[in-house]
Amino acid sequence: MEREGASLSRRELLRMIGITAGSAAMYQAMDGLGLAAESPYKGPIDLQGAPQGASVLILGAGIAGMTAAYELRNAGYRVQVLEYNARSGGRNWSLRGGDTYTELGGFTQTCEFDKDLYINPGPWRIPYHHQGILSYAKRLRVALEPFFQVNYNAYLHSSSAFGGKPQRYREIKADYQGHVAELLAKATRQNALDAAVSKEDREKLLESLRAWGTLDKNYSYVSSDAGSDRRGYKKDPGGGLTARPVPSQPTGLHDILDSKLWQGIPTGDTYDMQTALFQPVGGMGRIGEAFGRELGALIRYNSKVTRIHQDDRGVTVNYVDTSAPDTALTAKADWCLCTIPLPILAQIPMNVGPAMSSAISAVPYAAAIKVGLQFKRRFWEEDEHIYGGITYTDLPITNIGYPNTGFFSSGKGVLLGAYIWGLNAMEFTAMTPPERVQRVLEYGSQIHPQYTREFDNGVAVAWHRSPFTMGCYGMWSTDARAKHYDDLCAIDGRIALAGEHASFIGGWQEGAVTSSLDAIGRLHRRAVAQGAKA
Amino acid sequence: MKRLGALLLAVSLAGAAAADDSAFTSSAGLGSAGGAEIYSHICQGCHMPEGRGAVGAGHYPTLAGNAALVSWQYVAITVLNGKNGMPAFGLPADQVMETRTVHLSDAQIADVVNYVRSSFGNRHKDKIAASQVAALPHPGVP
């Protein structure tokens, strides 16, 4: 539709469908055009006409809270942000050398990484279509660099297949594809698919299967140059007298199926993981830090909210400074945007109606842990030629994430040694931080034996022990969402909630940005309707 | 007889090691876990060693000396259904994937309820059985 000379632009077409057939039909049409699934972010929010002197109190200096503070301030509102931590960012956070982190239970870790090395305990990648968070990174002049979701030379690993030896992603992918293509070609040629494939399509299908699976002239998947060009050679082509390549041998279909490593093939195919993805240069926390600098004194740190009360004149929030918890402090505003994670908010007295109140208590938070490991050298690059990307394993560590930056540098390097969910995450959370690091080292050394010799130090963040979230992110069940989601997002009097928990992009920063913009848009309209001091 | 005893010991040690390890790789290991093991592998992540609880921006309730534990029903219903950010552990095994939580059987819930009510200085004498947990409302059941 973007082609020149097209009689109707896509936007025009959608507008006409919207006018003539209603929004449901327009949504269907958008879906067909692949638009509806995109982030609802549509560029900078327009908050014109803020009532003179109107004020908004924002609870939480994470991505949702700071997005709101930035926009509302720019729109002319008087803004104050209360933040529990001593830093901005919330889950947008990087742990760097010299940082200390005390988790619930009092376990304190000091990160001993070298200069410029870091781990992102929270979000670590931004898909290209998360245009909200990307636009704030741009506006705040946070430099971005590529994040590699898929690395064909990283591993897929099963502790019970191939003798526990990790397999290169490219080998598993090429062989799975090759064998499936061969089978499908065989079925086609034996006329087994005649009911589903017309005579006309039959030859086209066969041709495509040969190309897709690197099949030979007999439609067989065998050792070949074409196959090796996908899965890698036994001996790579080179120059001069040592030039002649030696093709590699495919792994058999049975072994591929039996290993279950095919499960790891589509990790880069989901919409959230498709190329291109980005990460801030220097760590994800650079976004939260830049937001914090931008907002400056609007954020009051070390502030623990103890009560939220609204009446017909405004909102009053009681809080304490975490360094002097006996002194009661108070903040007031006309309106309140609360981004406090639900497990904490559920424990704070707040006079909202039963609908919002039930919604706040209806969302369990995911258990997740991340472990950063510093090694004395970048052996994954030097020994195994893995530059960025992720290895997937059936071991409890689930992932090994290689740094997508600092390639070929000498000196130390930091891996994401584990990124764990579910039962395993609960079990790792229950350990002390040094135990977690120790177990992650033991598991990881099954994939990279260099771990034992090269390990330097590590940090482990278990999200249920995070004092400022008490969990990783809201895990909505379909049932809970049907019952409570709209009530969670609806403004109650003078209070609106925002954060990834108030979005359909749970656990992603884009959910925080878009829920925040949606909520402040509605708060703004209400404020405009009621005037400065309603 | 002596040899059989030694053999059994060896088997049970191997079994213990396997159970400990498999608890980290699948729900298979969890399935055979009792109250103390469930507490130390799961509950303690939030409620802390010795049921100490914790305080940050919010809090995890202290279980040691917690007056609410006088009611076994309260404890069992909380474990079954979760509370605030705490996940439900009583969902049917085939429904835990959606919220990435964990299924505990009624017998395991009874066991862990008995464990917390008789540990960390708590001395509630009444033990409950799986059938008593089974009689309580479970999440995820239409």
Image (cartoon, coloured by chain):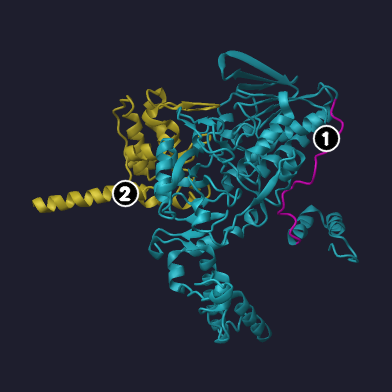
Residue A47 placement (x, y as % from top left)? 83, 35
Q: Chain of mark 1?
A: A
Using the rendered image of the protein, determine whether residue B132 is visible from the camera's viewpoint: no
Residue A339 placement (x, y as % from top left)? 65, 32
Where residue A474 sits, quadrant-wise, is top right
Chain A, which colour? cyan
Element type where label 2 sits in the image: helix
User: Does residue B3 belong to the magenta stretch?
Assistant: no
What main secondary structure does the magenta stretch of the protein show? loop
- Residue A47: assigned label: 1
- Residue A70: assigned label: none
Where residue A497 sits, quadrant-wise, is top right
Give the side of residue A350 with respect to residue A398, left or right. Answer: right
> Looking at this view, is A466 or A86 the one in front?
A86
Residue placed at 54% from the left, 32% from the top? A98
Q: Which residue is mark 2?
A: B19
Residue placed at 63% from the left, 26% from the top? A83
Please state the extent of the stretch shown in magenta in the rendering.
A33-51
User: Type of residue at label 2?
Assistant: Ala
